Amino acid sequence: MKLLVVEDHRELRALLRSHLERAGFAVDTVASGQAALDAMAAADFDALVLDLGLPDMDGMAVLAACQKLPHKTPCIVLTARDALDCRIAGLNGGADDYVLKPFDMSEFEARLRAVLRRTHGTRENRLGLGNVAFESVSRLATVQGHPIDLLRREAMLLEEMLRVWPRIVVKERLEEHIYSTRESVTLNAIEALVSRLRRKLRDGGADVLIDTVRGLGYRLVLAHDTGRHGHQP
């Protein structure tokens, strides 16, 4: 899942990004309200982590603007404002949770995952095709009920391909979904990622294969359909 962290404190911003990336998320970070609005207008995020004390505008104004966007993004507010009326205003303004600074990073991650479970209930939390299953919140992939060990980006690739099946995932969409905007991505990097996931699915006994659609991207197919689709190994 892809997150946008809006925090003007440099050290905390870096700490949040580092912890969340280790936890398996793709993370973009910005330091101002306007940068947050620009990022939200340009791309879809699975959740927004929003500091209220921003240098150019109040975080509540960012939250209000986000509510008007076509894609509703769950939001966790981070703030030192501990007054009850501030917490009530944040929740009534559209925040899904309200976390006071300072906070424990592990507890914050748990609360983030709880928000994702609640707010993404309309999207499938459990995805599957053939004998392959994927839990989007825990990021657990299994083949016939047996876990397969996937790295963060491998898990993100599998989730995206399962989510859009039977459609093709174009390479540009993979770059947007799996990598943050600060990372430069080469075609070779995408191909290497697909190759690793393809090998792990095969070694795990999956009856699902990754089909290369030349010039476009990739899609998942069931093994017995490969003759019809022209699977590329």
Image (cartoon, rainbow, N blue to C red):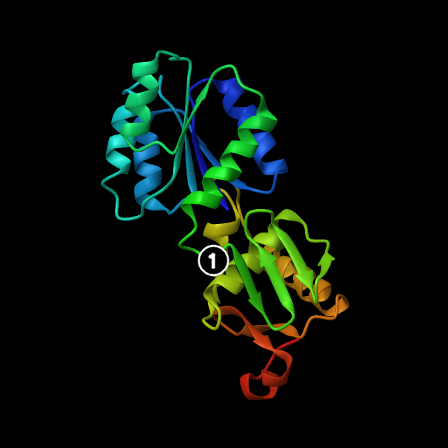
Disc 1 crowd rating (10 Å Cα; few below 14, some 14-19, many 20+) is: few
Residue under the image location 72 percent in, 57 percent down: 147
Closer to us: 143 or 62: 143
Q: How many marks?
A: 1
Please name the residue that numbered disc 1 is placed on: 124
- Asked which secondary structure carries label 1, the reply is loop
Q: Position of residue 183 (x, y in %)?
A: 53, 42
Q: Position of residue 137 (x, y in %)?
A: 55, 47
Q: Position of residue 41 (x, y in %)?
A: 30, 43
* Quadrant assignment, res 224: bottom right
In the rendered view, would you say 30 is above or below 210? above
The C terminus sits in image quarter: bottom right
The residue type indicated by label 1 comes to: Glu
Horizontal side of 104 relative to 94 (left or right) equals right
Closer to us: 182 or 126: 126
Residue under the image location 53 percent in, 28 percent down: 108
Closer to us: 39 or 104: 104
Residue 181 in view, yes or no: no
Residue 53 in view, yes or no: yes
Residue under the image location 45 percent in, 51 percent down: 176
Identify the residue at the far bottom of this view: 228
In the rendered view, would you say 233 is above or below 91? below
Q: Position of residue 35 (x, y in %)?
A: 34, 31
In the rendered view, would you say 112 is above or below 224? above
Identify the residue at the far right of this view: 203
In the rendered view, would you say 88 is above or below 150? above
Residue under the image location 48 percent in, 51 percent down: 177
